[in-house]
Image (cartoon, helix red, strand yellow):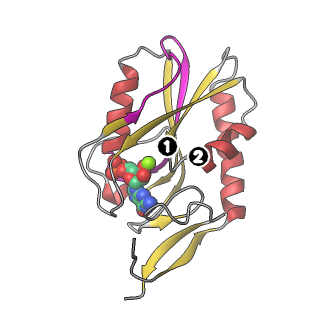
Amino acid sequence: MTQNPYVIDQMISAKAIAARVEALAREITAHFRGTDKLVVVGLLRGSFVFIADLVRELDLPVEVDFLEASSYGDATHSSREVRILKDLRGEIAGRDVLVVEDIVDTGFTLSHVLHLLRARGPKRLEVCALLDKPSRREVDIRATWTGFEIPDEFVVGYGIDFAQRNRNLPYIGKVRFLA
Ligand code: 5GP
Ligand code: MG
């Protein structure tokens, strides 16, 4: 696939991300203290780096599961249609659940996923999102914990892609087109 040339300007350094992940993990650990086991649900694919770092900072018994919902395809425009491409492997009824998302943008994806998971009767259901773009919100929803609020820019890195590229950048950067 051909791609217009672009550069990536660093927005959030790897060091700043690591510090924030540690702080988020401390709050999440305190919130769920005493749980028999926390089911950490990563929304594929963008959250895979974040969830890997986050679970290693949680001082709790955890189980990791994944859910894949599609809203973007390969374009930079959100669609209101959310499809579940891969469901959880485990049961969440009566369990403590933490959904881990990369970015809350319009809010359609998160609202759809929470509706789906809530219907399964978890004991507690909370959300930790790495990034939030509040100015883009169309659905009244917010994560329990947010890493960073960012402006309306298209970002990549730390697990987040542009047409399946740049997920392996250790920092978060914004895409700037040259042509
Ligand atoms: P929403 O349903 O809230 O509009 O979209 C959420 C999803 O859109 C995120 O989980 C993420 O996959 C994708 N998304 C939103 N903003 C960006 C962005 O700046 N860069 C990339 N690569 N994906 C984004
Ligand atoms: Mg996503």
Does the closest atom of ligand 2 sit within 8 Å of the Cβ of label 1?
yes
Asked if residue 131 is positioned above or below residue 24 in the image, the reply reads below
- Give the percent coordinates (x, y) of residue 47: 54, 47
Q: Which disc is residue 44 wearing?
A: 1
- Give the percent coordinates (x, y) of residue 164: 48, 60
Quarter residue 95 falls in: top right
In the rendered structure, which segment of residues is drawn in magenta? 85-107
**Residue that appears at 44% across and 83% down:** 5
Question: Can residue 99 be spotted in the picture?
Answer: yes
Quarter residue 151 falls in: bottom left
- The amino acid sitting under disc 1 is Leu
Question: How would you rate the neighbour count of disc 1 (Cα within 10 Å): few for under 14, some for 14-19, many for 20 or more?
Answer: some
* Residues under numbered marks 1 and 2 in contact, where contact means CB atoms less than 8 Å apart: yes
Which secondary structure, mark 1? Answer: strand
**Residue that appears at 36% across and 45% down:** 70
Which secondary structure, mark 2? Answer: helix
Q: Quadrant of the C terminus?
A: bottom left
Asked if residue 133 is positioned above or below residue 1 in the image, the reply reads above
Residues under labels 1 and 2: Cα distance? 7 Å
- The amino acid sitting under disc 2 is Phe
Q: Which disc is residue 7 wearing?
A: none
- Give the percent coordinates (x, y) of residue 123: 50, 15
Q: Which disc is residue 48 wearing?
A: 2
| Residue 50 shown in magenta | no
Quarter residue 76 falls in: bottom left
Question: How would you rate the neighbour count of disc 2 (Cα within 10 Å): few for under 14, some for 14-19, many for 20 or more?
Answer: many
- Give the percent coordinates (x, y) of residue 163: 43, 63
Question: Can residue 104 be spotted in the picture?
Answer: no
Q: Nearer the viewer, residue 15 or 7?
A: 7
